[in-house]
């Protein structure tokens, strides 16, 4: 039995809603099956859906309403039609329950598969519908666009630039040069140029003999470059995870006092297993453990927590190290944490202080642990970060250059590839995935997304589950003090 409500006109249905914008309880069915949405959330969604339908003047006096015909009607504004589709797109199971919940006698819903097709149709005609008549034609107008390739990791940078993944993507320094104290004092300029690599390959007759040369003789090139512009990725997220792995390996060696860098040796693996269990018991962080998706638990969120004041990670991991190594290890952790805060912020940096801190951290590592490996990720952070933000972002932090957006799409790409893409060929599969991702990032739909805010301070840059900025204002930690000296803004960035 369906709930007995007025159903002659859609306005009658709306008049039965409560004053606070929620649908009456007697119009909601199968509430016990809605595990994912609370009653309040579902009622709010239904109220918004009905208000959206009512706002479309085309169907104001209609007794029978078809959502498919409504969205496809050219007289319906494109933004309202997309908003209506956005309200309906709640997943297959929720969509079926939503059709049962809303009075379906005079509102005819499309199938879930047609719902996705309707969105693609609306996106394809959005550019024509939103701006059908340009107000004025501008002549002799030149638009300059600077494209900075930054939203990819080191593997993609190595493929595009032709340089090996074990080398620095910014400079042509060798592995021996990375640990040269004199070169560190002089500085490592960003001098890797894609034009030089392309010109070099154009004069090579025998490619096989060229790759037979040593790594330094062929300038760390492993294949012919694909890109024609310089590849200098900032990669703030992968810098976090890379330095996090390096610091853990350093502590693994210090715990057993093995002063030769050998991450794959059996004794290091035993030390790693012990510390993984110890850290998880004390702080709850899962460090470098396999997860269900085929990767590891050393994600960007774990690395950020490890380099913050939110957990007792530093005190926990250094408690297993001999006392003589604790002060210098703590100094490296504190200075790296402050550098990362500037790296992943949008504040304007004090270039002189930042350059001094990066160089001091570099020299501390070389002086205290000369046996430790200087990885390309750590070298890029300490040797090139100051020049990178000065030249590419006018001395501001590189938060806008983060590759977190593309990394967060990995699960979407996996879902689209498995369920929503044609399997005819690789090309058609990529096209279908790209179309889905384009629809996902449509500007009109993004404006209607819910903005998460913190219940403590009301700001939208973080949530209640994360460390609230107001709770950190009274904590005069060494990391916060160091971050304040490196930026022009004294706001604390957790």
Image: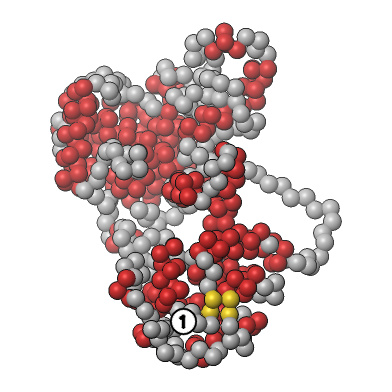
Image: 293 above or below 68: above
- x, y (%) of residue 330? 25, 38
Residue under the point 48% across and 32% down: 155
Q: Check disc 1 and report the residue beneath it.
A: 103
Position of residue 102 measured from the top left corner of the image (x, y, whole percent): 45, 79
Residue 294, picture quadrant: top left
Residue 236 in the figure: left or right of residue 115: left
Position above or below: 151 against 15 = above
- Residue closest to the eye, 302 or 65: 65
Residue shown at 70% from the left, 67% from the top: 129
Quadrant location of the N terminus in the rendered image: bottom left
65 left or right, relative to 334: right
* Residue most extreme to the right: 139
**Residue 193 in view of the camera:** no
Q: Is residue 245 left or right of residue 383?
A: left
Image coordinates for residue 427, horizontal then vertical, percent:
60, 39
Q: Quadrant of residue 37?
A: bottom left
Q: Quadrant of residue 133?
A: bottom right
- The residue lying toward the viewer, choosing from 470 and 474, is 470
Determine if residue 414 is in view. yes
Display coloring: secondary structure
Q: Residue at horizontal 36%, vertical 62%?
A: 463
Mark 1: few, some, or many residues within 10 Å (few <14, many ≥20)?
many
């Amino acid at each position: 039995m369906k709930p007995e409500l007025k159903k002659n006109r859609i306005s009658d249905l709306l008049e039965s809603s409560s004053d606070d914008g929620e649908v009456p309880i007697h119009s909601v069915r199968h509430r016990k099956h809605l595990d994912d949405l609370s009653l309040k959330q579902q009622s709010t969604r239904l109220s918004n859906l009905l208000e959206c339908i009512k706002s479309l003047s085309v169907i104001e006096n209609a007794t029978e309403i078809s959502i498919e015909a409504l969205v496809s009607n050219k007289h319906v504004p494109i933004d309202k039609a997309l908003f209506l589709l956005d309200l309906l797109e709640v997943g297959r199971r929720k969509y079926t329950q939503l059709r049962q919940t809303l009075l379906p006698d005079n509102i005819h819903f499309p199938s879930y598969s047609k719902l996705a097709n309707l969105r693609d149709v609306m996106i394809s005609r959005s550019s024509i519908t939103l701006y059908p008549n340009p107000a004025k034609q501008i002549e002799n107008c030149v638009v300059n666009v600077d494209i900075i390739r930054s939203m990819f990791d080191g593997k993609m940078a190595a493929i595009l630039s032709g340089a090996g993944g074990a080398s620095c993507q910014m400079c042509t320094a060798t592995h021996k040069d990375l640990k040269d104290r004199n070169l560190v004092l002089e500085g490592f300029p960003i001098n890797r140029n894609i034009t030089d690599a392309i010109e070099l390959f154009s004069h090579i007759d025998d490619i096989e003999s060229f790759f037979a040369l040593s790594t330094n003789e062929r300038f760390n090139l492993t294949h012919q470059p694909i890109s024609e512009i310089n590849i200098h990725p900032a990669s703030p997220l992968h810098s976090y995870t890379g330095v996090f792995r390096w610091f853990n390996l350093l502590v693994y060696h210090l715990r057993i006092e093995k002063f030769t860098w050998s991450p794959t040796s059996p004794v290091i693996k035993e030390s790693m297993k012990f510390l993984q269990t110890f850290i998880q018991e004390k702080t709850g962080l899962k460090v470098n453990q396999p997860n269900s998706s085929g990767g590891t638990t050393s994600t960007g969120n774990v690395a950020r927590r490890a380099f913050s004041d939110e957990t007792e990670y530093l005190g926990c991991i250094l408690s297993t190290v001999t006392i003589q190594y604790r002060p210098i290890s703590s100094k490296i952790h504190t200075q790296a944490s402050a550098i990362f805060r500037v790296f992943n912020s949008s504040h304007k940096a004090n270039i002189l202080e930042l350059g001094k801190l990066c160089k001091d951290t570099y020299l501390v590592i070389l002086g205290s642990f000369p046996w430790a490996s200087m990885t390309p990720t750590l070298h890029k952070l300490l040797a090139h970060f100051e020049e990178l933000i000065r030249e590419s972002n006018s001395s501001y932090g590189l938060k806008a250059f983060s590759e977190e957006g593309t990394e967060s799409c990995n699960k979407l790409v996996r879902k689209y590839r498995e369920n929503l893409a044609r399997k005819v060929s690789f090309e058609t599969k990529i096209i279908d995935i790209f179309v889905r991702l384009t629809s996902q990032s449509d500007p009109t739909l993004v404006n209607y997304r819910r903005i998460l805010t913190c219940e403590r301070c009301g700001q939208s840059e973080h949530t209640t589950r994360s460390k609230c900025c107001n709770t950190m204002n009274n904590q005069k930690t060494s990391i916060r003090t160091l971050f304040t000296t490196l930026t022009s803004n004294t706001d604390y960035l957790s």
